[in-house]
Amino acid sequence: MVERDLRLRNDFEVRRARSRGRAHAEGPLVFRVLRNDIDPPKNRYAFVAGKRVGNAVARNRSKRLCREVIRHLHNRISPGYDLVIIVRGEASELPSYAAVRELIERILTRARLLAPEAPQPPAESGAE
């Protein structure tokens, strides 16, 4: 779950980001990205799924998958933006965590918001 202070909680903030933000889309996901003036810089997120996604269970599952991916990627995303993640299409287009993560990473990379992943140190073998 995305921490409470990292959420866009007011309706007017979400509307402002959706109307003024730059759109980046891939498949069933659309990101609206708007720079914010918070000091110190931090990102805030909102997740939206319309009725076309499916019933309430499908909409909530889609948003939950997106929230979980953002929670894991949050430290790699450049700070200082309001991001509204809009799920469109059908819930079947977001079948798993891995598929959603791949989509979100591609969108954030294209938007130039995602820092490259730190290389993992080589694993030491115990036998020498």
Image (spheres, rainbow, N blue to C red):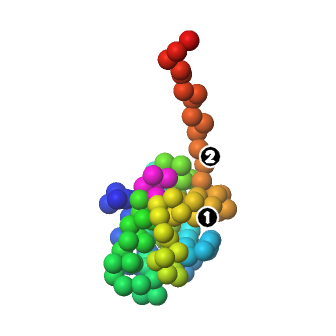
Whether residue 61 is visible, yes or no, is yes
Numbered tag placed on residue 32 in the rendering:
none
Q: Position of residue 125 (x, y in %)?
A: 53, 20
Most extreme residue toward the top is 128
Q: Residue at x 39, y 78 (%)?
A: 59
Occupied quadrant, residue 35: bottom right
For the residue pair 58 and 15, the one nearer the viewer reads as: 58
Number of disc labels: 2
Choose between 1 and 124: the one closer to the eye: 124
> Could you tell me which residue is drawn at 60 percent across and 53 percent down?
114
Identity of the amino acid at label 2?
Pro
Q: CA distance from mark 1 to mark 2?
A: 13 Å
In the rendered structure, find residue 116 and report the number of the disc placed on it: 2
Does the magenta stretch mainly form a helix, a strand or a loop? helix
Q: Which residues are magenta?
A: 69-74
Q: Element under label 2? A: loop
Asked which quadrant contains residue 29, the reply is bottom right
Q: Where does residue 85 sit, x and y in percent of width and height?
A: 49, 71
The N terminus lies in quadrant: bottom left
Picture quadrant of residue 5? bottom left
In this rendering, position of residue 85 left or right of residue 27? left
Q: Looking at the image, is mark 1 or mark 2 earlier in the sequence?
A: 1
Q: Is residue 37 visible?
A: no
* Picture layout, residue 104 above or below residue 124: below
Q: As drawn, which residue projects farthest toward the bottom?
A: 52
Up-down relation of residue 52 to residue 14 (above or below): below
Quarter in which the C terminus is drawn:
top right
- Rendering coords of residue 15 (x, y %): 46, 80
- Residue at left offset 38%, top offset 71%: 61
Mark 1, residue position: 107
Q: Is residue 21 above or below residue 119?
A: below
